[in-house]
Amino acid sequence: MLKTSRSIRYRLAAAAAAVMMLSGCGNDDTSSQLSGYKSETQASVTTTTSVTTTTPADESSVPEETTTSVTTAAAPDSVPDVPEKKDDSVVHLCCAGDNLIHDNIYEDARTPEGGYDFTKCYERCKKLIEGADLAILNQETVVNNAFPPSTYPFFSTPTENGDAVIDFGFNVISMSNNHVLDKGSTGLISSLDYWDSKGILHYGAYRDAADADDIKVKEINGIKFAFLGYMEHTNGQYIPQGQPGKLIYLSEEAKVKEQIERADKLADVVVVSCHYGTEVLNELNDMQKTLTPKLVSWGADLIIGTQAHALSTCNYLDKPDGGKAFVFYGLGNFLHTMGGSNLPDGQHGKPLIGIFGSLDVRKSAEDGSISFENIKATPVISHFEGTDYHKMWYNCFVCPLSDYTDEMLENHFIHQYSGITREELEGYLRYIPDEFLDYKKPE
């Protein structure tokens, strides 16, 4: 066995002490550093300390030099940044059907001072719109200052009703409907002026061709929405040549396709309002069945259907890119007083029940894809009371069907007129898929 002289042992001890002193600087955990330990937050910079000792082969031989290297990790200058995971963007969206303001409604809303207060008409549905980032209403009648209030067949609605729906929470207005020209070009432009004065985004009716081609886009919570609106017809009324105003009809498929494709490049979500469907029928007609898939293939993400004054089904449709679009084929009415002798027997209840739609729009932080979640179709009922079909009705309001009591129904004019029952009203809900239906029968 080789032996080490006293002088050699002394030098080894001194060298080891030096190593311990060097490795201990700035770090109390000397044993960890000597064993090559490096924590996750330490930089990958190392310091190598060499200690040379002399060991003879035997007592009389020439000493051999042996080098011992100890590697220590240098203290990091800073902790490296760890990228934070971004959260998805989410927008809570609501949509309601026809705000159809008959004379019963605005006369019931008259104040002693001669103005109008429509607050009570909507207040029972306030909980449905609470928390909405984006709330879309189909304004079926022309809200304007140019004409006095009037009812069917040529509607004109006081601006106080517009004030009420804004106060209620709607912040986007669709004007794509068959009554938008009830007061001609003048009424249309006056209505556009009103919504502009309130700073409310509106679409579906325009000042001119340039305005119609200027696709309306609104960004909320990092998600961009584009809005387009088209109608099947305008009750035989058209904008006279040379007068202001511009509409685009669903029959103009080439134009509709071009706008949707362009909107798809401008926004994350393309919302298309379609005024289509057969009046007072819950079933889909041929236009709804054939045109809707085309809209989706061109780039529509959310389709909001109105016109029939009766609710229709709702569902997903496959998009060409593998995603899913969603379609409310018919929201039916929101606030109105339709009913009575002009409806066929057995259909008196159809206009009463509409859908208040809601969903969450999610944009993935990872890849930017769009999905719809928590979709609900909440049935609402328009209530009004009266003693005679030919006299003015009163106590007009819209209410969630889940909150609509039997006592309310007993006072409803249509119940008194036709004997409509709750079971008949609930029967219309069969058109809504169970996975989306948001209804609980009142206790």
Image: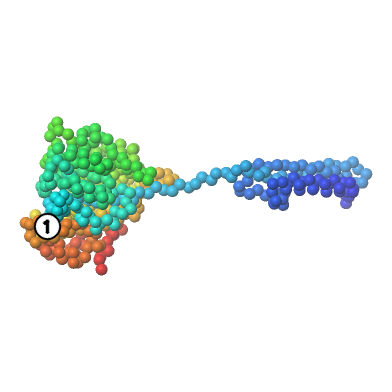
Q: In percent of the image, x 11 and y 49: which residue is there? A: 151
- Position of 43 with respect to 107 (left or right) is right
Residue 32 at x, y = what percent? 69, 51
Residue 199 x %, y % = 27, 41
Residue 120 showing in the rendered view: yes
| Residue 364 point in image, percent of width and height | 41, 47
Point out residue 144 in the picture as x, y percentages from the top left corner. Answer: 17, 43
10 Å neighbourhood of mark 1: few (<14), some, or many (≥20)?
some
Among the 4 quarters of the image, the one containing residue 79: top right
Nearer to us in this view, 256 or 240: 240
> Which residue is tagged 1?
393
Residue at the (28%, 50%) spot, across then down: 169
- Quarter of the figure with the C terminus: bottom left
Query: Farthest residue in the top direction?
Result: 242
Q: Is residue 385 above or below residue 171?
A: below
Quarter location, residue 242: top left
Q: Is residue 354 visible?
A: no
Q: Nearer the viewer, residue 258 or 241?
A: 241
Residue at the far left: name it. Answer: 390
Q: Farthest residue toward the right?
A: 60
Q: Secondary structure at mark 1?
A: loop
Taking the view exactly as shown, the residue that stands out farthest to the bottom is 443
Q: Quadrant for residue 43, please give it.
A: top right
User: In the shown orientation, is residue 342 left or right of residue 91?
Assistant: left
- Looking at the rendered structure, the kind of residue marked 1 is Trp
Residue at 69 percent across and 46 percent down: it is 26
Q: Note whether 221 is above or below 428 in the view shown.
A: above
Coloring scheme used: rainbow
- Residue at coordinates 7% horizontally, 57% vertically from top-left? 391
